Amino acid sequence: MKVLVLGATGLLGTEVMAALKERGLRAYGAARSGADLKVDVTNQMALFRLLCRVDADAVINCAANVNLGSCEADIEAAYRVNGAPAGVLAAWSRQTEGRFLQISTDHFFTGDLPLPHDEHAMVSLVNAYAVTKFAAESMARKAENSLTIRTNICGAKKGFGRWALDCLRGHKPMNLFADYFTSTMHVGDCAAAIVELLVSEETGLINLASRDISSKSDFIRALAAEMNIDPSWVTETTARDLTPIRALSCGLDVSKAETVLGRKLPSLQDTVRSLVHEDAQCVTTTNSKSATALSA
C-alpha cells in the first residue's frame, strides 16, 4: 500500500510516517517544508496535482492549524487549512475509491465536565477552530471509504507535553486547570493505532484516545508522579476565563475503537509513562549527537 501523509512534519505526522514504515507500508510525507514532498494544502489545485502525481492508495490528513488564537483571528485562513482540504480529499476518494483518513479533534464538547462522549454525541462549536474542524468532518463523511478520527495527543517534542515536562523538571510556575477535561493519548500510541485503522475496513467516525478522562491538573500530577517530582508549588485555576473560549468537556468514549482494534487503549498512567520514556529517548539522542559533533 502506498500512503500519502499530509502534515508529515508535525507532531502526529512524524509519528504516523514512522508507524507506516515500521509496518512495511510505502509512506510519502508532504508538508510546506522539510518533507519528501512540498505542498501548501491551502492551495487546492496544488493539492489536487499532488494527489494525481503520487497516485497513492490512501491519504492520511494530519495537517491542521491547532492555534486557537490564530484560528479566531482569521477564520477564513483557518478554514483553508483545517476545512477545505478535506473536500478535495473526499472528492479524490470518491473518484478513485482510495482510502481517506481525516484526523480531527476532541474540541467539540462542553458543559458536562468529565463525561465521555461517543461518536453520536451532540457537538458544541464554541470557537473558530472547532467550526473549521467540524466542517472537515462533514466533507470527509461524503466519501464512502473515509474514516474520521477524533483524538487528543501529547508528545515530548513539542506542544503541551513538552511544556509540562519542562515546567515540572524546572520547577517553573504552573497554573493547572481543574475544569478542563480530555482523554489525552501519547502520540506514538495514537500513530500506531491510526495505521491499524488505516488497514481495517472501518469507515465513518471513530474516537481514538486514552480510555481515561482526566483534567489538565490530574494529567500534570500523574506526570509529576511518573517523574518522581513533588509538584507542591503548582496552583489550580479555572479554564473558563480563557480567550478564545475553550470546549472544556472533551472526554471521549473509546469503546468503539477498542472493539475495532481488539484491545484496550492506553490509560492515563500508560500515557504519562510513554511521555516520560519518549523524553528520555530525546535526551539520549541529543547527547549522542553532541558527543559525535565534539569528536568529529
Image (cartoon, grey):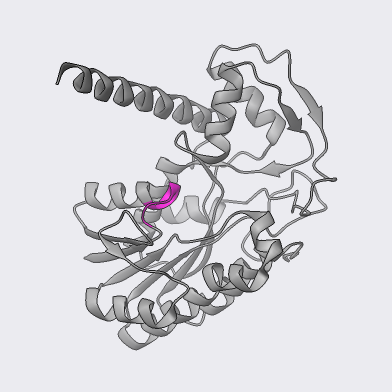
Q: Which residue lies furthest to the left in this view?
A: 296
Q: In percent of the image, x 68 and y 69: which residue is there?
A: 131
The magenta stretch is: 8-13
User: Is 9 colored magenta in this rendering?
Assistant: yes
Q: In percent of the image, x 52 and y 29: which residue is there?
A: 272
Query: In the displayed structure, would residue 215 be above or below residue 65?
Result: above
Residue 270 in percent (x, y) is at: 49, 30
Q: In percent of the image, x 19 and y 21: which residue is there?
A: 292
Residue 240 in percent (x, y) is at: 84, 45
Q: In percent of the image, x 55 and y 24: which residue is there?
A: 166
Residue 8 in percent (x, y) is at: 36, 56
Residue 29 visible? The answer is yes
Quarter location, residue 121: bottom right
Quarter location, residue 135: bottom right
Q: In which quarter of the image is the N terminus?
A: bottom left
Q: Quadrant of the C terminus?
A: top left
Residue 55 visible? The answer is no
Query: In the displayed structure, would residue 252 be above or below residue 199?
Result: above
Residue 257 in percent (x, y) is at: 49, 54
- Total marks in image: 0
User: Is 160 colored magenta in this rendering?
Assistant: no
The one of 110 and 116 positioned closer to us in this rendering: 110
